Image (cartoon, helix red, strand yellow):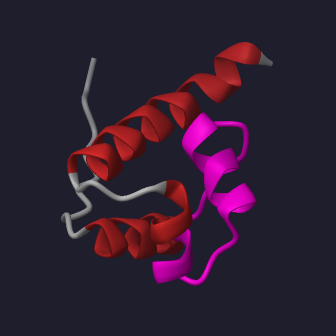
Amino acid sequence: MRARRAPARYIGRRMKAARVEARLSQEKLAAKIDMTRCNYARIERGSTNVTIETLLRIARGIGVDLEVGFVVR
């Protein structure tokens, strides 16, 4: 079960870094994107899956572009 959450945690860490760099608190960002702080915090912790649409809302709220890529190994 932990391995399945690894991608969500990775995305959450990246989101947090972008939010902190933009000098936004969880509360301010959540309000800006019409989400509760608790729900946003769950996404940032990686404890829930998130849709691409929600990731796009978050990216726009932070003021960054959302980039999705695939790495072939």
Q: How many marks?
A: 0
Tell me where the magenta segment starts and ends, as one range: 30-51
User: Image quarter for residue 23?
Assistant: bottom left
Q: Nearer the viewer, residue 21 or 5?
A: 21
Residue visible at 22% across and 46% down?
A: 21
Q: Is residue 70 left or right of residue 27?
A: left
Q: Residue at x 73, y 15 (%)?
A: 2
Give the answer, above or below, for where 58 lies relative to 70.
Answer: below
Q: Residue 3, position in %: x, y?
A: 66, 16
| Residue 42 screen position, x and y as percent | 69, 47
Is 70 part of what is drawn in magenta?
no
Going 25% across and 26% down the picture, which residue do you hit?
72
For residue 17, which quarter of the picture?
top left
**Residue 65 against residue 33 in the figure, above or below:** above
* Rendered residue at 72%/46% (across/down): 48
Q: Nearer the viewer, residue 72 or 17?
A: 17
User: Which residue is outermost to the right?
Assistant: 1
Which quadrant holds residue 67? bottom left
Q: Is residue 19 left or right of residue 27?
A: left
57 lies above or below 68: below
In-image side of 70 versus 4 (left or right):
left
Image quadrant in which the C terminus is located = top left
What is the x, y in percent for residue 55? Answer: 45, 63
Name the quadrant of the N terminus.
top right
Percent coordinates x, y for residue 50 in the rendering: 61, 57
Q: Is residue 49 magenta?
A: yes
